[in-house]
Image (spheres, rainbow, N blue to C red):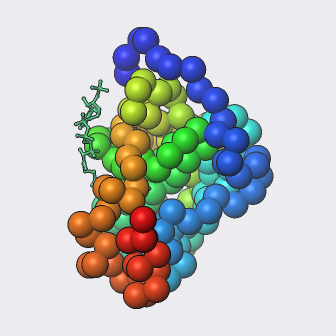
């Protein structure tokens, strides 16, 4: 992370501490309520610059026998950390993601996530996150990521047509 960082300020339109974060896209595999096979993560804003989430480790998330698939865990980290930039400004997309897997995570467990903004420099937002099963001081996995803020409408304009969103929603996204 660079040493020269811009000041962090909570965005005036960000949801308040303790409130559920608004879905960035209802068909998102991570948090979308309409994603047919998604993780359906519900995220909550913390004080200052963090978000939390909980995920039941369902049997459909299995990788090795009886434990979570590493890719599912990294997807969850990506989406939870991806919500944090919305506390300080516009949407941001992942440009870099790294995950440290510390312990096997059993199917049937309840994973709790916390993602913190560590700093911002221009359009780059640096985040870190932990996942634990009850004891935040003993994480089962940790992650770091860099997000870059975007103008969402422009960024997705060429791709909206491929979305699972309804035609009405797609029209709304394309409207000037
Ligand atoms: C909307 C909420 C979504 C949340 C859902 C979960 C998150 C996701 O899964 S997003 C999906 C996966 N990510 C993507 O598809 C992103 C693909 N990448 C892109 O589209 C482009 O690289 C994009 C738009 C992010 C940046 O491109 P562009 O606008 O040309 O900016 P660019 O100048 O290259 O980069 C901006 C800054 O980021 C830095 N940067 C770019 N990539 C990286 C990288 N991999 N590592 C470190 N820094 C990087 C650049 O160095 C630059 O920094 P500086 O301000 O110091 O010059």
Task: Residue 3: name its quadrant.
Answer: top left
Specify the farthest residue to the front: 176
Q: Position of residue 75 (x, y in %)?
A: 38, 60
Residue 34 visible in the displayed image: yes
Quarter of the image where the C terminus is located = bottom left
Depth order, front residue of 7/66: 7
Q: Position of residue 148 (x, y in %)?
A: 36, 40
Q: Nearer the viewer, residue 91 or 131?
A: 91
Q: Residue at x 67, y 55 (%)?
A: 44
In this orientation, which residue lies closer to the viewer: 96 or 61?
A: 96
Viewer-proximal residue among 115 and 112: 115
Would you say residue 66 is visible in this rendering?
no
Count of marks overlaid on the render: 0
- The extreme top residue here reads 3
Q: Position of residue 67 (x, y in %)?
A: 40, 67
Residue 12: image quadrant is top right
Q: Kindly identify the residue that appears in the image at 54 percent across and 78 percent down.
A: 33
Q: Is residue 23 left or right of residue 72?
A: right
Q: Where is residue 104, by image quadrant? A: bottom left
Q: Is residue 106 left or right of residue 70?
A: right
């Amino acid at each position: 992370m660079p040493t020269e960082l811009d000041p962090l300020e909570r965005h005036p339109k960000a949801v308040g501490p303790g409130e559920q974060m608004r879905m960035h896209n209802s068909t998102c595999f991570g948090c979308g309520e309409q994603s047919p096979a998604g993780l359906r993560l519900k995220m909550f804003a913390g004080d200052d610059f963090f978000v939390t989430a909980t995920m039941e480790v369902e049997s459909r998330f299995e990788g090795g026998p009886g434990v979570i698939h590493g890719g599912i865990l990294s997807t969850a980290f990506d989406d939870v950390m991806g919500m944090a930039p919305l506390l300080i400004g516009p949407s941001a997309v992942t440009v870099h993601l790294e995950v440290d897997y510390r312990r096997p995570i059993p199917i049937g467990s309840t994973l709790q996530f916390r993602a913190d903004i560590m700093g911002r420099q221009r359009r780059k937002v640096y985040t870190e996150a932990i996942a634990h099963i009850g004891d935040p001081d003993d994480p089962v996995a940790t992650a770091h990521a860099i997000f870059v803020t975007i103008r969402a409408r422009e960024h997705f304009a060429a791709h909206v047509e491929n979305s699972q969103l309804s035609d009405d929603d797609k029209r709304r996204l394309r409207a000037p």
